[in-house]
Image (cartoon, rainbow, N blue to C red):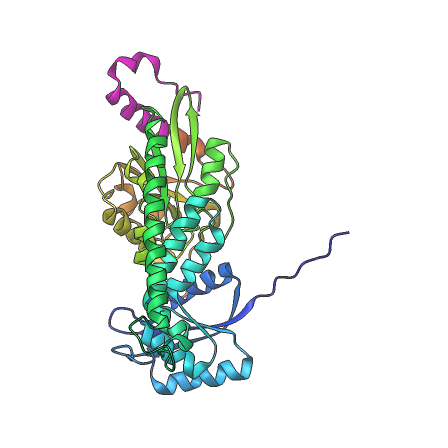
Amino acid sequence: MLEQKEIDYERTVLVGVINKDQNELKVKEYLDELEFLTYTAGGEVYKRFVQKVDLPNPKTYIGSGKMNDVEAYVEEHQIGCVIFDDELSPAQQRNIEKQLKCKILDRTHLILDIFSQRAQTSYARTQVELAQYEYLLPRLTGLWTHLERQKGGIGMRGPGETEIETDRRIVRDRITLLKKKLLKIDRQMETQRGNRGALVRVALVGYTNVGKSTLMNVVSKSDVFAENKLFATLDTTVRKVVIGNLPFLLSDTVGFIRKLPTQLVESFKSTLDEVREADLLLHVVDISHPQFEEHIASVNKILGEIGSGDKKTIMVFNKIDQFTHETIDDDDLITERTEEHFTLDEWRKTWMRKVGDRALFISALNKDNLDEFRKRVYDEVRDIHVTRFPYNNFLYPEHLDEY
């Protein structure tokens, strides 16, 4: 008989700041997302600390009074890890560790940790390792304080490196080696993509945890790993899909997130080549999420950064089965009606009607409106295919009843 295994979640505390760039509402959204990231990484959030500051403290990020509050809470509740919502400088991280005497992470480090857990293939592991080393390099002094002093005494007075310099050189050498390894893998991946022939390529893009892998499984009848956690998919999966009588390639890519670390964008550029080389993008959006409009903006920003902002895109609003809206009582004359009160039909009549000709509203989990989805994808893929191969037009007549 198998014993029931209990997951031992690490006790954590979150810290965020309100400033001119992010108001109280936005900070709450960011911390909600940070809590989901923490849960994905294996932590349980006990408390959140938020401070209003114009500029972050250069020494400890938050003010000394708030830092004392955090210190008292950490000591009283035996907290093992404090996570900051923004990236900390090496000096800030070192100073905070000295005062709180526990593990200190920032948003970037947390995302890198999740990526290292999720990386399955050698390719993904190499990409994550490169990002981790590039993040680690300026923080070596904070991690190994015993290496800060140069050794002295008999036989140690000659020219040479301090231990920290030796460590930095080792890390730099490792970064160079990983970059060479990635270049080699990139060439192999490029050859693989070239060997796929002239099939039309369609890529699923979107924020993390919007249901891309679930949609991939439904459309391609495959078994791609899908889970209600952030960054469940890290390795790009490509499947051949046939709708009607028309074959094309569908790829499931890594999800995007707000404040995505630059190290990850750089090291995952080759994974994002699937997006760059796609003929059609299916931008999947979780319409049940209160901040889905911000998610769309974040994804569009990253698509622009990798040179794919002007590609032909179909907006696919997923999870309509989980969509809910706020209601106002008939006798309530005070509450002002906002976007939170929009029904699904009302959303359809807004800017969504104009996005990419017309947006699609589906539920990949419950398979709602999938016939409309398949027909739209078929039409778009067929247009691309016929443009590329005009002489193949007669091979793919309209098959409206075969979706």
Which residue is at the front of the view, 353 or 275? 275
Side of 99 where 76 appears, left or right? right
Q: Which residue is at a point 50% across and 51% down the rendered structure image?
A: 228
Where are the magenta residues, as a range?
A: 377-403
Say if the magenta span includes residue 379.
yes
Q: Quadrant of the C terminus?
A: top left
Residue 260: image quadrant is: bottom left
Which residue is at the front of the view, 201 or 403? 201
Q: Which residue is at a point 49% across and 60% down the rendered structure image?
A: 41
Residue 334: image quadrant is: bottom left
In the image, residue 62 sits, relative to residue 40, either above or below, namely: below
Q: x, y (%) of residue 212? A: 43, 43
Residue ranking furthest to the front:
155
Q: x, y (%) of residue 245? A: 41, 19
Say if the magenta span includes residue 341.
no
Residue 313: image quadrant is: top left
Side of 292 where 77 appears, left or right? right
Visible in this render: residue 329? no
Q: x, y (%) of residue 161? A: 32, 70
Residue ranking furthest to the right:
1
Visible in this render: residue 113? yes
Could you tell me what secondary structure mostly forms the magenta stretch? helix
Q: x, y (%) of residue 232? A: 47, 49
In the image, residue 379 sits, relative to residue 97, either above or below, namely: above
Q: How many dots with numbers?
A: 0
Which residue is at the front of the view, 390 or 97? 97
